[in-house]
Image (tube, grey):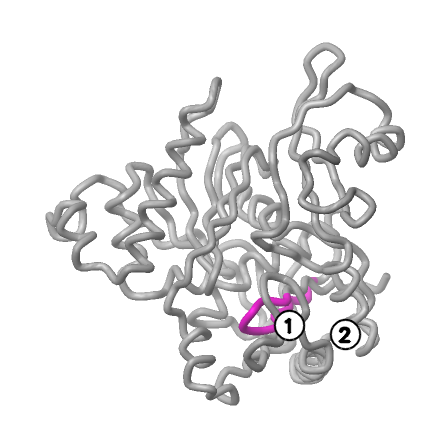
Amino acid sequence: MGKTIVGLEVTEESVRAAELSLGRKPQLIAYGEVPLPPDSAHDSEVLDAGAVAVALRQLWTGARFKSRDAVLGVASRRILVREYTTQAMRPDLLREALPYQVQDLLPVPASQAVLDFFPLGQQGDQVSGLLVAAVSENIEQIISTLSKVKVRAQAVDLTAFGLARVTAALARPDETVATVNVGDHTTQVVIARAGVPQFVRVLPIDVDTAATRRHTASDLEPALEYAAVGVGMGASTGGVVVAGAPGANGGRTRGSLRAAMPPGVSDLAARLRSTLAFFASRPNAAPLSNVFVTGAGAGVDGVIPALTAAIDTPLSVVSVADVIGMSAPPPAGEVALNLVGTVGIALGEVHR
């Protein structure tokens, strides 16, 4: 592997990547996002390998990435993430036993799934953690598409794990925080302590981002965005803090604000509130100290006021400049919000 690593995401709307320098203080040195034609991909699944390969080639050329080694981040409603407890054993033995143990939990035969287990703690001879299962055909299809443009997938990571990793520096090690990535069609929620995921949910909700509007208008060209090595830029000190008190936003109540919201935003606020309440109701659940919100949907009108009104925990909007130093011109708008998760994916390999 070279001196840099690329975090890569294939979403329904675009291919997006961020290149980080390796070392003790990684920096964002280049990034890019290229839109996809409609029906080219869906939920981290490649539907049209040719169209995705063309976009990937544009991405690597336009952003002038130095490395062709990439960590692939995946986020899909079809990826199973759930708490699981099993007999403690050596990691290699657990990998062999896992397919037989979890077959009844999977939507496909274990032989057709990619399985991983993220241990969180052990009590006696039982180890508890997060079980992750994805359809192997979908992962293989993305890796095969990458190979068409000579990009090597060094690892595959759950995007939610990258989100937990990248926002860990914004909280104290003893704090439990939620990171919410509001995407174009899915919202990822990960609750973590010291960067270690404790709980993951993927909520299928459409949000009216610029990317979804481009697809509706079939106007792809203006969306290409790249940046390569440029003047040195330091990370900012923190996100934009939004008050988390009920009844915020000019004194409007939750009910009146909900009535004024577009349907997707209202649904997002209600389901996020329900998700966080479910986590809080679990035995021994630690209280949340902060909710970090990122992703393109965080910049959509009405989203942050709606989430602020729905959630009692303080909210902070997080942009990529809040989580990593830069030696590239800083991104702006939705790209700056989307890159938070992409950087988190790459950081997993940087710290490996």
Q: Residue furthest top?
A: 124
Q: Residue furthest left?
A: 251
Looking at the image, how many numbered discs can be counted on the residues?
Answer: 2
Query: Residue 196: which quarter of the image?
Result: top right
- Horizontal placement of 251 versus 181: left or right? left
Picture coordinates of residue 256 (x, y %)? Answer: 13, 51
Report the magenta stretch's main SS: strand
Residue under pointer 2: 66
- Out of 231 and 280, give the one closest to the viewer: 280
Where disc 1 sits, the SS reads: strand
- Horizontal placement of 280 versus 154: left or right? left
Picture coordinates of residue 12 (x, y %)? Answer: 56, 69
Q: Name the kind of residue labelled 1 in the image.
A: Ala
As drawn, 297 above or below 220: above
Magenta region: which residues?
10-20
Residue under pointer 1: 30
Query: Residue 45: which quarter of the image?
Result: bottom right
Q: Name the kind of residue labelled 2 in the image.
A: Lys
Of label 2 and label 1, which has the lower sequence position?
Answer: 1
Circles 2 and 1 in contact, beta carbons < 8 Å: yes
